[in-house]
Amino acid sequence: MSLSKIDIDNKTFTRSFRGYSTSEVDAFLVEVAEALATGAEERKALKERVAELEGLVDEHKQKEQTLRDTLMTTQKMIDQLKANARKESQLIIEEAQNKAEDVLNQAHLRMAQIHDDIIELKRQRTQFEVKLKSLLDSHRQLLEMENQEQEEIEALESKLKFFKKAK
């Protein structure tokens, strides 16, 4: 049974020879004790839930930081691959200009191979971007779910504050 401050303030006992009726007072005290115990149990459960959710938030923050680090490393690797491809193509062009017709034909074959490599790298890059976007979307969805849970917690906390004020 839930008791409010008003219930306690308005409680009246019948008078007996030596004051209030002991049985009524004892029954009311038992009722108040049960209400307080229930409130304490609910508060403890809410505190445990908050601690659990805070742990989840910390875990998601760590995952987000790991993802950021991975993205930075990936970007550096991509930049390095591009720089290496540019250097290699420049060397091939310089070599082709310095050689005779035979060497020029070999350079054209090499350029075709590099072109295929670049196409393959672009394909791999496109695949990586698709996978990365998918991963980001799933993490975004996780964060949105976390936000919904946080809003529910805030709503529960608001109700708890209301009950505390009512007491």
Image: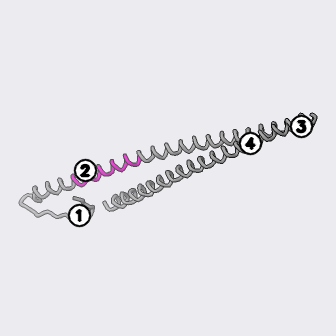
Amino acid beneath label 4: Asp
Q: Earlier in the sequence, mark 4 or mark 2?
A: 2
Residue 152 in the magenta stretch? The answer is no
Quadrant containing the N terminus in the rendered view? bottom left
Which residue is label 2 attached to? 37
Q: Earlier in the sequence, mark 1 or mark 3?
A: 1
Amino acid beneath label 2: Ala
User: Over which residues does the magenta segment extend?
Assistant: 34-51
Residue 46 in the magenta stretch? The answer is yes
Crowdedness near tag 1: few (<14), some (14–19) or many (≥20) residues, C-alpha within 10 Å: few
Q: Nearer the viewer, mark 4 or mark 2?
A: 4
Which mark is drawn over residue 116? 4
Which of 57/75 is in front? 75
Which residue is label 3 attached to? 104
Quadrant containing the C terminus in the rendered view? bottom left
Do the numbered discs 3 and 2 sit on residues whose CB atoms are within 8 Å? Answer: no
Q: Earlier in the sequence, mark 4 or mark 1?
A: 1
Q: What distance separates the C-alpha of mark 4 from that of mark 1? A: 83 Å
Mark 3 secondary-structure assignment: helix
| Residue at (69, 38) in percent of width and height | 77
Q: Nearer the viewer, mark 1 or mark 3?
A: 3
* Left or right: residue 66 compared with residue 44: right
Q: What distance separates the C-alpha of mark 4 from that of mark 2? A: 74 Å
Which mark is drawn over residue 7? 1
- The quarter of the picture where residue 163 lies is bottom left
Magenta segment, prevailing SS (helix, strand or loop) = helix
Measured as percent of width and height from the top left, residue 160 is found at: 36, 57
